[in-house]
Image: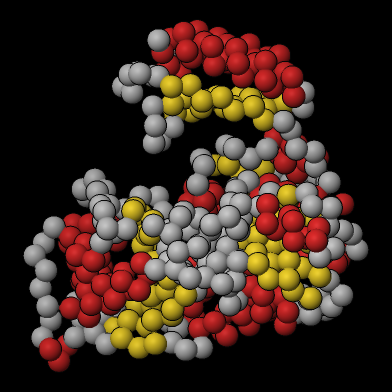
Amino acid sequence: MGARKYFGTDGIRGKVGESAINPEFVIKLGWAAGKVLAGHGTNKVLIGKDTRISGYMLESALEAGLSAAGINSGLLGPMPTPAIAYLTKTFRSEAGIVISASHNPYYDNGIKFFSSDGFKLDDDIEIAIEEMMDKPMTCVASNKLGKATRINDAAGRYIEYCKGTFPSELSLQGLKVVVDCAHGATYHIAPNVLAELGAEVIELGTKPNGLNINEGVGATSMRSTVEAVLEHNADLGFALDGDGDRIMMVDHLGNVIDGDQVLFIIARDALKSGRLNGGGVVGTLMSNLGLELALNKLGVPFERSKVGDRYVMELLQQKNWTIGGENSGHVLNLNLASTGDGIIAGLQVISAMLRANMTLHDLAGGFDKFPQTLVNVRFENPESDPLNSDEVLTAKAEAETALGKQGRVLLRKSGTEPLIRVMVESDDELASTTWAEKIADAVRNVSS
């Protein structure tokens, strides 16, 4: 198996018109994927996209490449990433393709694949697609070309599925909810789900124009959601990102509820209702220590993966657990969806509110977030490894001894820049800051 040239941890992503995100490359990618998938018995693939203007171009290019390989395409139009994973299963398609760059600006885009079960394609298939990319592109005979059809009821199917994950004995009647769709793929989904369950919905970010996705709205820019919750005296707010796989929330007082708090609320409710079944929760290296301690106090096991929802998924599958996520708002409920789903995670939080007869503010107060101090230290020689120097290891050990069980230290290299990221977390904010700076100074000393 060769080394990966195109696929990263979340598919292929880049700036439109550059690197891999251009028509020529994407036609070839569609053809290569079609050839490999055909070898595994595939004859139909679903294609969905978010609301970026480049989605039209990339959709057409993928469709052309797949057709040349003899693969039929079902075009879903703008749909959330988790919806495409779900519909790939329900339409019995052998694969699904998502055209999205998630929370990135409009000028970026990306492509990722789902298998027939709604999970990420196996690594060996991705590598086989890359290897096929190096071969000359061919075309099947005219009578073998793939056809493309528009699937018109995709949104309705997914709305019904989301509603079906909400307990039938509960209703959103009487709740006022702000829904910020980031001018992204949930613009015609999330407001309808909540309204049909009985909520009074205040819509934000539901007027995509191809260029405004994630621009000052959504899960990566919470100010507009906070302001709308306070202005409309809403009970809570949802803020989704451009492709709908992450959620941040706002309580009635305007406090932002992040992914760690969402994860805690869902896990505690599952424990109380007997749905945890002895399982635990997966977070990441960046998950707040307060989350870990609060879950442990409840007797719920907690494990950390590397940063990235792909790694959360892998550890959940290893443990045979169902609940995991990141503080950025990627929350996995594998008993309900095969990938991170912002709408479904939000509905789980609301159902926990209703079952406990508590506000989101009170539910989120179930654990105290520890102050985190993050210091980035630049080092000149990217080949060096300051993290293994005696001075840095000594400073780290001293900090861990001083902080004890009420704190932790995380040192890691950036994957994109020559930076060492120093994170110290403690129940004492002054201690977090002091030890972070001491360790950062040690990194600077050995990096200079």
Does residue 368 sit above or below 224 in this rendering?
above
Q: Quadrant of the C terminus?
A: top left
Q: Nearer the viewer, residue 14 or 67?
A: 14
Q: Nearer the viewer, residue 281 or 240?
A: 240
Specify how the rendered protein is coloured: secondary structure
Viewer can see residue 341: no
Q: Residue at x 35, y 18 (%)?
A: 380
Q: Is residue 106 left or right of residue 265?
A: left
Q: Nearer the viewer, residue 13 or 88?
A: 13
Viewer can see residue 288: yes
- Residue 349: x, y in percent? 75, 61
Q: Residue at x 61, y 80 (%)?
A: 159
Q: Is residue 83 left or right of residue 227?
A: left
Query: Residue reaching furthest bottom?
Result: 143
Q: Is residue 189 left or right of residue 379?
A: right
Q: Residue at x 51, y 88 (%)?
A: 153
- Residue 393: x, y in percent? 52, 13
Q: Nearer the viewer, residue 442 or 229?
A: 229
